[in-house]
Amino acid sequence: MIASPGFQMSRTQYASYAKHLATWGYVVVLADYADAGFFADHEDMAVDVSKVIDWALAQSPLAADATKIAAVGHSLGGDISVFAASRDSRIKAVVAWDPVDSTSPSVVPELMTSMSTAIAVVGETSDATGGMACAPAGENFQQFYAAAPSPAVQVTVTGADHMDWVDDPSCVFCGFCVDGAASPELARTVTRRLDVAWLGLHLRGDTSMKSWIDSPPELVQGSIAVASK
């Protein structure tokens, strides 16, 4: 599994997700981009994901399974994960954490119409509007879900905000986004569970994971909403 960071975020911000997945037997590579500046070419970043896959498969001690490859990522990293899956058929599943599309080039819906990858998105609505919207409504996780082929799932975390997915919310850029009303731990817990369940179902064929996707505990509590197709 290749994990890609959000815009101007370090891979270290997502170490907790990698460690959690590793306890479930996944080989996780946290990747930084060679060029992640304001004018970076996102296609180059998607190509980098494929290069990281090549590197991981060549490392004998990792014993990575070439038939069970996934990509996950936050914000821009979620966008890049979907972009990479659109051009690399080895990527069988994607979990995008509050992904945000861009115009360099746009992924949604242009690159998603012919995809066969199983795509899960999890997101929030606190940062969808306003002058400093970090996940604008026209480019947010809901747009990825709308364009995704089946199978796909969308999880909305009520009251969460765009930076709830990083391990250290005191980061330099974190303060530019709107603070949500929910505890950041809600988004992190829901996302870690979704990661395990979605990859377990679509990489390992573990159908017991489906109940955790369709009816997670937070759904009963009313703190999230789930849609699937």
Image (cartoon, rainbow, N blue to C red):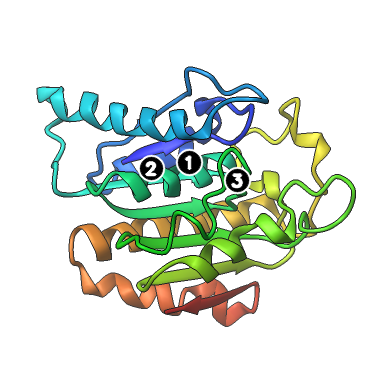
Quarter of the image with the C terminus in it: bottom left
Identify the residue position indicated by label 2 in the image. Answer: 84
* Dot 3 crowding, Cα within 10 Å, few <14, some 14–19, many 20+: many
Q: How far apart are marks 2 and 1 (CA)?
A: 6 Å
Picture coordinates of residue 203, whole percent (x, y): 22, 57
Picture coordinates of residue 228, whole percent (x, y): 45, 78
* Dot 1: element: helix
Picture coordinates of residue 182, whole percent (x, y): 74, 59
Identify the residue position indicated by label 1 in the image. Answer: 80
Identify the residue position indicated by label 3 in the image. Answer: 165
* Lateral position of residue 26 relative to residue 181, left or right: left
Task: Indicate which disc residue 88 carries.
Answer: none
Q: Is 151 above or below relative to 193?
A: below
Q: Is 160 above or below relative to 2?
A: below
Q: How far apart are marks 3 and 2 (CA)?
A: 21 Å
* Lateral position of residue 41 relative to residue 72, left or right: right
Write down the quadrant of residue 171 in the picture.
Answer: top right
